[in-house]
Amino acid sequence: MIYVDSSVLLAYLQAEDRAPPATFWEGVLVSSRLAEYEVWTRLHNSGAGANMKELAKILLERLALAELSPLVLERALQPFPLPLRTLDALHLATAHYLRLQDPGLTVATYDERMAESAQRLGFEVLRP
């Protein structure tokens, strides 16, 4: 199972050079419900057209979305190996919670600070 950070979702939607290949989306993918809000906020703020919004909808439906449960929020209150922005801390707290169910959980991100924090927490990190 791969935990997908919003940086990966947005890179794909915005067709950035570092975007993951189409085959990446064929695996078992999970993210925080938070990613849904991050993607839609970014798309609305950028004035994205109907085609990109439809692609976002399809992409988000492909993910299993974990809620920000009390256990996730409790973990987010604890320190991380590096200082993180609030949303990144919530993503890593969600990944930590999901790793309790799947010890082989991998984190996919393009955010360098989040990637380094995830590695220090023992996650395998992908930069697809």
Image: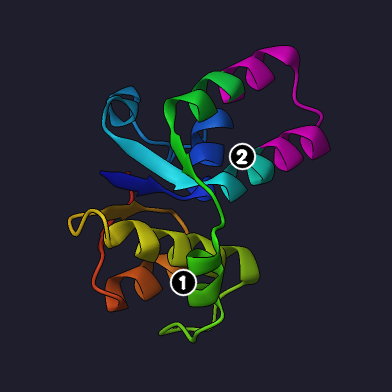
Quadrant of the frame with the C terminus: top left
Tag 1 secondary structure: helix
Place residue 26 in its image quadrant: top left
34 lies above or below 123: above
Q: Which residue is mark 2?
A: 36
Residue 83: x and y, percent? 53, 83
Contact between marks 2 and 1 (CB within 8 A): the answer is: no
Membership of 48 in magenta stretch = yes
Q: Amino acid at mark 2?
A: Glu
Tell me the SS state at disc 2.
helix
Q: CA distance from mark 2 to mark 1?
A: 21 Å
Residue 115 quadrant: bottom left
Residue stretch in magenta: 40-56
In the rendered image, residue 52 lying in the magenta stretch gets the answer yes
Q: Nearer the viewer, mark 2 or mark 1?
A: 2
Q: Which residue: 22% across, 53% down?
A: 102
- According to the image, label 1 marks what residue? 113
